[in-house]
Amino acid sequence: MAMELKFAIRAALLGGMLAACGNAGGSGGGSAGASTADAGARSSSAGRANGGSGTGAGLAGATAAGAAGESGGNGGSLAGGGSGAGGGNAAGTGGGGGSAPAAGTTPLKGLAFNLSGSSCDDLPTLGVSWFYAWAANNPCATVRAEFVPQIWGSYKDRPGVATPATAVAKGAKFLLGFNEPDGADQANMTVAEAVALWPDFQVPGVLVGSPAVAGQGSWLPEFMMQVSAKSLRVDFIALHWYGWDAGSCNDTTALEGKIKWAEQWQRPIWITEWSCRLQSADVDKKFLADAQVMLAKHPLVERYAWFLSRSSGEFVNAALLDASGKPTAIGSEYASAPAFH
């Protein structure tokens, strides 16, 4: 969602990269409760990231493509479940294709984190398993939670933006694509500009997230069609959603609609920004609780990250922590949610 607040936050966060623990998973299958097609899409993604022969992009032929990716790529499910990484990384063993991973090993609950006005202590306070900061550099390198780097925008004309190779040079196993390229005050890129840079994202052993669009218009469908035509990988779909106006967080209908829209590509989904704007604290807390139930019904949703730990102004009632770092009512709800799945 294009907005000046987010632009100001992210503009200060561009730089180098220091990655924390990554998880490429084993050769095992999909997340607990996932359909066979879901597990196939995940295995295919990991197989292709590690140089395998899985050719399916998780589209209509997700099941067959996943089998090909698993047998050829030896890379395993995005959801993990195996020990070690395949495709030329450290050898390890995992479960059979499509089987559920061991409980509590796959990162789920994360945070879209801005160090300005916050603290690295916010991450363990909220019990998150991963986070990102709209940049390639890790602002909290001593925290145990996994840091996932992002290429915010075009590194061709934005000097502060790292290249994909630089962003993952210290061992990151996941990489987030451009930030709201469909927004004039965000990455602001045409589909052609993004596709031209996408070959640089094809780093062996690294699973790549799509550009995270603000809306549900033609930008991402056109991008996905063009990269598919060029046989370029997109291993998971990153998306943003905000309850922007009064009443939009009264239930989870709009958020679920965005998820269903993203499911058309039959890849794992990361909700890398979501929150409620200008809603009451009670509405926000109930929305978060209801969303946990709803998300569990969508096995392709692999990770999510609430927008900011501390906030003020339009998002003050959605802040997970108060100014002193203590959990708010909604923050206690978030902290009690499972960090892994």
Image: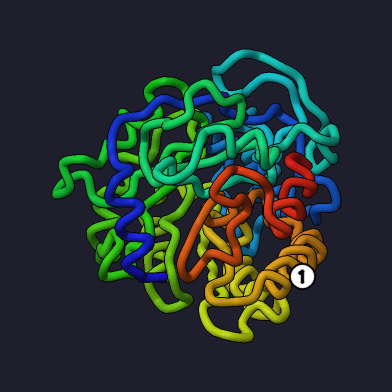
Number of marks present in the image shown:
1
List x then y, in percent, for residue 116: 39, 44
> Is 271 on the left or on the right of 164, as rendered?
right
Determine the image quadrant of residue 281. bottom right
User: Residue at the spot x=53%, y=73% of the render?
Assistant: 277
Secondary-structure class at tag 1: helix
Q: Is 259 in front, or is 224?
A: 259
Q: Quadrant of the N terminus?
A: bottom left
List x then y, in percent, for residue 102: 84, 32
Residue corresponding to mark 1: 286
What's the residue type where badge 1 is placed? Answer: Lys
Determine the image quadrant of residue 27. top right
Q: Residue furthest top?
A: 90
Q: Is 214 in front, or is 275?
A: 275
Coloring scheme used: rainbow
User: Residue at the spot x=59%, y=55% of the render?
Assistant: 306
User: Residue at the spot x=58%, y=70% of the render?
Assistant: 276
Q: Residue furthest front?
A: 324
List x then y, in percent, for residue 48: 53, 38
How busy is the neighbourhood of tag 1: few (under 14 within 10 Å), some, or many (20 plus)? some
Q: Is 336 in front, or is 338?
A: 336
Q: Quadrant of the C terminus?
A: top right
Q: Is 65 in front, or is 327?
A: 327
Residue 37 in view, yes or no: no
> Is 183 on the left or on the right of 127, as rendered?
left
List x then y, in percent, for residue 125: 67, 37
Residue 88 in view, yes or no: yes
User: Residue at the spot x=73%, y=72% of the render?
Assistant: 282
